Amino acid sequence: MTGEHSFTIVIAMKRNEHVEKIIGFYHARKRMPSYREIMRLTGFKSTNAVYKFVEKLVAANLVKKDGQSRLIPTGLMNETPVLGRVEAGFPSPAEEELVDTMSIDEYLIENREATYLLKVSGDSMIGAGIMAGDLVLVERKGDARDGEIVIAEVDHKWTMKYLRKKSGRIFLEAANEKYKPIIPKEELKIAAVVKAVIRKY
Amino acid sequence: MSYDAALSIGSFPRAILHIDGDAFFASCEQSRNPALRGKPVVTGKERGIASSMSYEAKACGVTRAMPLHEIRKRCPNVVILPSDYETYSLLSKRLYAIVRRYTPDVEEYGIDECFADITGLRRPLHMSYEQIAERIKRELDTELGFTFSIGLAPNKVVAKVASKWKKPSGLTVIPAREIHTFLENLPAEKIWGIGRHTSNYLEKLGITTALQFARMRESEVRARFSKPFYEIWQELNGRFILPLTLEEKTSQASIQKMRTFTPPSNDKKFVFAQLSKNIENACIKARRYKLAARRITILLRTSTFHDTAAELSLSHGSAFPDEIVTACESPFNSLFNPRVTYRATAVILTKFEPVLSQQPDLFGESVRVERLVKLYDAVDAIAARYGKHTAFLGSSFAAHAYAQHKGDRGDAPERKHMGIKGETKRQRLNIPMFIGDVS
């Protein structure tokens, strides 16, 4: 199954009332039902019937089985159908409602509880388009990757720089030729990763 | 009775977490401002006493409610900050939200602590109770930027013992069958809910440790103590008795407004103005919850921390400062002593009734009340548009004329003048800020 075709099947399966019950169960209990629970939900008479049904879901890539043949939701829960790819004709109003919108908050913030604001001073990241007076949205995280802009703690001050990890060496690099790279003498304390820049005019 | 016997068998018939921020307010400050890292930090500048102190300050011997001048003596390099409740409550909500990722059963017990029921989550989360607690702790520590202490136990009372067991940044697990080992050397008064009075009484019975209390005979506990202590006794014995309070607070049993002012004053007009302002504030809150109070308590605190109070009842419920301030005048006059200086006033509204149930009475009272209703609808509308206390009573004037605190105690938290474009005095972004220069 490829492309458009498989998508149609996926959507058709999603509309299936048995599938809806499973989705409902998942949302209510935050876990996938067992075979026996699916039997009860759907009214199948045997676990064998459930097995066949589950095989179809696996084939459509909606669920996966783990080693102990528990179910893992894959395509079932996290896929938002995109309007216009479902059918060739014009979309019906019912499907139009499937398109979700997000607020600018949701767009900018991935993990709300870990997100903080910081007002920028200095011009060390000017080459990355971050200017003095800008607000940056930062996320506190356990670790950061090479190339990310990070907020680190150096000499009891915040510093905002590119994080560079090259052949085992870790250092901070400004986006401005005026500043030399900062090579930490001891452990580098990274507080957060920059996720967005806000400049209001 | 064998003294090493377990109080209970099994491990976690229920799995309750108590999660407690380590030096919450001071940690909020240190985590957002690296200049404060590793330094003794105390919050509560505006109150004149310590409301929270960092572990570095605790190491200097600073304790809660210690006056600031004494703190400066003990700890000359201390950093004393005004409380920034705006930021603390944002972080408090994040604490609850992170715990709710794992369970909806969260009791928001205080601004810096909560209980959570994680019973039955091992299978769906594919983790042991201890692993769940570890995960929550890791997420709190990373995402809020300072540490939390967690206790895992079969009930709330023992979970409290566990979270206090190792601080800061502890994770202590007490299965039912091991409770006795934790209570053995724990003074009874360290148990949540056992106060000075009860521990004195226990001492008279020859009981000093929590384990001795837990080993009392059930019949004796029931005979000698009231229900709350019997419940504590049962929880110490591993049973789950005290449920988690999950609903958010929607109604109020009482509304209290207390403000300290500096310098202390014996100017009668000024002190009354402070009280009047508190009454206005309390009434604003009462009107927000659509409540009317029938009992009013006023309190004056002297500069030597002596409290005097008076109580009065109203013939009908009220949330209008005009009525309450007038009613408080004569009790205030009898409390006030011009030879004494005062540092704070407070008002407590209790015995609430919902505004709707108010009976119109004879003597044309209802007409007068209706006029007050209209007046305060207008006052609240003005406040919503132009800010709290845009219109206030003449009797509060002296309290509004100056800042609450003269001198450096009047400093506002740094967040208040960060000057973010688009923020106003009344509305600020709901995301906490890092503080300090960024190089």
Image (cartoon, rainbow, N blue to C red):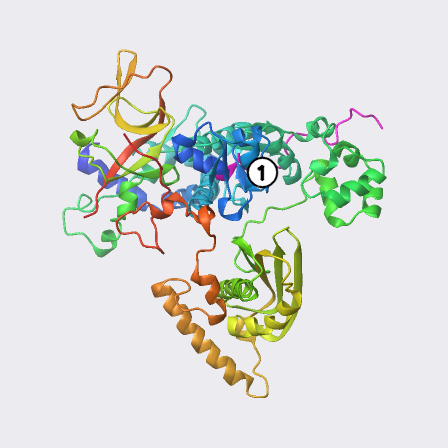
Is residue B409 visible to us here? yes
Check the image and name the residue furthest to the top: A167
User: Can you tell which quarter of the image residue B130 is in?
Assistant: top right
| Residue ID at (42%, 30%) | B142
Q: At 58% from the left edge and 73% from the top edge, which residue is drawn?
A: B317
Q: Quadrant of residue A11?
A: top left
Q: Position of residue A95 (x, y in %)?
A: 24, 51
Circle 1 residue: B70
Magenta-span inclusion, residue B9: yes
Q: Residue furthest left?
A: A89
Q: Main secondary structure of the magenta part?
A: loop
Q: Which part of the image, by quadrant, shows the N terminus of chain A?
A: top left
Q: Secondary structure at mark 1?
A: helix
Residue A183: image x %, image y %?
A: 29, 16
As for residue A122 lying within the magenta part, the answer is no
Q: Quadrant of residue B200?
A: top right
Q: Chain of mark 1?
A: B
| Near-viewer residue (A1 or B37) | B37
Q: Nearer the viewer, residue B277 or A26?
A: B277
Q: Nearer the viewer, residue B285 or A28?
A: B285
Viewer-side residue, B139 vs A8 = B139
User: The residue under label 1 is which amino acid type?
Assistant: Glu
Q: Compared with residue B317, is residue B86 higher up or lower down, i.e. above or below? A: above
- In percent of width and height, residue A131 lies at 20, 36
Which stretch appears magenta? Answer: B1-25
Residue visible at 34% across and 51% down in the picture: B428
Can the viewer see residue B120?
Answer: no
User: Farthest bottom residue?
Assistant: B363
Q: Residues within 10 Å of mark 1 (few under 14, many from 20)?
A: few
Is A87 placed left or right of B376 in the picture?
Answer: left
